[in-house]
Image (tube, rainbow, N blue to C red):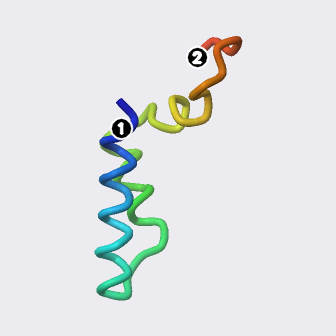
Amino acid sequence: MTAIPVIITKLLRFCGLLFGRGSSLPGKVTLKLFPHVLSRIAHHGRRNIRSA
C-alpha cells in the first residue's frame, strides 16, 4: 500500500524539476494525502516493531 504515495511523490518531484520549483513540495503534498506513510515506510520489513 506504500507504492501509491511513493509514485505520487516521484511524479511531483519530476514535475517540479521540469518547472524549476520546490524541493519540499512533493513531501508536503504526500504527507497531506497520506499522513501515516512515513511510519509504514520506516517500519517496512521490521516485524518486531509495533506500529503506533
| Quadrant in the picture for the N terminus | top left
Q: Residue at x 37, y 61 (%)?
A: 10
Q: Which residue is mark 1?
A: 34
What residue is shown at x 30% (from left), y 42% (from top)?
4
Density class for disc 1 (Cα within 10 Å; few <14, some 14-19, many ≥20) is few
Left or right of residue 8: residue 51: right
Measuring 30% from the left and 63% from the top, which residue is drawn there?
A: 11
Mark 1: secondary structure: loop
Residues under labels 2 and 1: Cα distance?
16 Å
Q: Position of residue 36 (x, y in %)?
A: 45, 31
- Above or below, 7 against 41 in this view is below
Vertical side of 42 occupied by 31: above or below:
below
Question: Given the image, on which type of amino acid does mark 1 rest?
Answer: Phe
- Image-based side of 51 in relation to 5, left or right: right
Which quadrant would the C terminus be assigned to in this image? top right
Q: Is residue 18 above or below residue 23?
A: below
Measuring from the top left, give residue 28's x and y in whole percent.
42, 55
Please give the residue where the numbered disc 2 appears in the rendered image.
51
The percent coordinates of residue 43 (x first, y second) are 61, 27
From the top left corner, tell me how far across and down residue 3 is, in percent: 36, 40
